[in-house]
Amino acid sequence: MSSSSNAPQLTIGVLALQGDYASHARVLEEIGVRVKMVRKAQELTGIDGLIIPGGESTTFLKLLAREGLFEPLRSFAASRPTFGTCAGCILLAKHVSGPEQESLGVLDASVERNAYGRQIDSEILTDETRLPGGPLEMVFIRAPRISQVGAEVEVLATRDGSPILVREKNVLAATFHPELSEDRRVHRYFLQMIQERRDSGNS
């Protein structure tokens, strides 16, 4: 999948409080997109979309509270293009278990933290996806599991029958780490989501 000819004009924010934000930034720069590191609420302005990286979801919650970012982030993700990977997926979901915890609640899905157990802390799989271009390499690190999705959620890839890449309107979420693969299709798909939104007259 090729990126849109307008992609270089996009500015994508990457939540940079903790986790693997630097790898996402490198991927975005590699495919010709401006990157803005987001650490304060005011830095959510002037961006076309936002990536919430992997990391540790409970630590994210503490840092979001400390920086006064939780509600501004929830508001942004409720209406603007937002992509969460691993811990980012957990933060976006409406319901979190293993154990239960607060979340932004903008993705109609239930997510189980650390669902695959310590014996599969890290795993690289290659499997089919609904994205064009054949099988996709997926890097899992202490991955969560999406146990349930709502009727409006589109499942783009699965692992053992469970969704691992999903989209609901302006929200994209993955339980794996596409920034750690050489395959850029998931990031390009997110850019395509943003461009489609722009073309339809939504900002």
Image (cartoon, grey):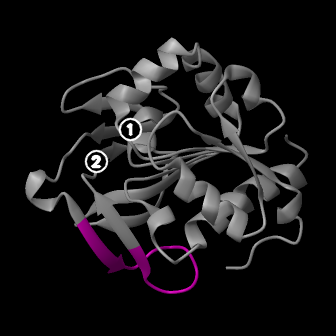
Query: Residue 197: x, y in percent?
Result: 80, 50
Q: Quick check: is 131 in the magenta stretch?
A: yes
Q: Label 1: state its secondary structure.
A: helix
In the image, residue 50 lies at what x, y percent? 66, 42
Kindly indicate the quadrant of the structure image that contains residue 74: top right
Left or right of 46: which side holds 80?
A: left
Q: Which residue is mark 1?
A: 90
Q: Residue at x 85, y 40 (%)?
A: 203
Mark 1 is surrounded, within 10 Å at the Cα level, by few (under 14), some (14 to 19) or many (20 or more) other residues, namely: many
**Which kind of residue does numbered mark 2 sit on?**
Pro
Q: Is residue 169 above or below residue 188?
A: above
Is residue 29 visible from the viewing direction of this image?
yes
Q: Judge whether 153 appears above or below 135 on screen.
A: above
Q: Which residue was labeled with disc 2?
A: 144
Compared with 41, 110 (above or below) is below
Report the magenta residues as a range: 123-137
* x 88%, y 72%: residue: 5
**Residue visible at 21% across and 45% down?**
114
Report if residue 150 is visible in the image. no
Say which label, 1 or 2, has the lower sequence index: 1
Question: In the rendered image, which quarter contains the N terminus?
Answer: bottom right
The secondary structure type at the circle numbered 2 is loop
User: Residue 39 shows which numbered tag?
Assistant: none
Residue at 18 percent across and 47 percent down: it is: 115
Residue 132 in the magenta stretch? The answer is yes
Whole-percent x and y of residue 92?
Answer: 47, 35
* Tag 1 near tag 2, CB within 8 Å: yes
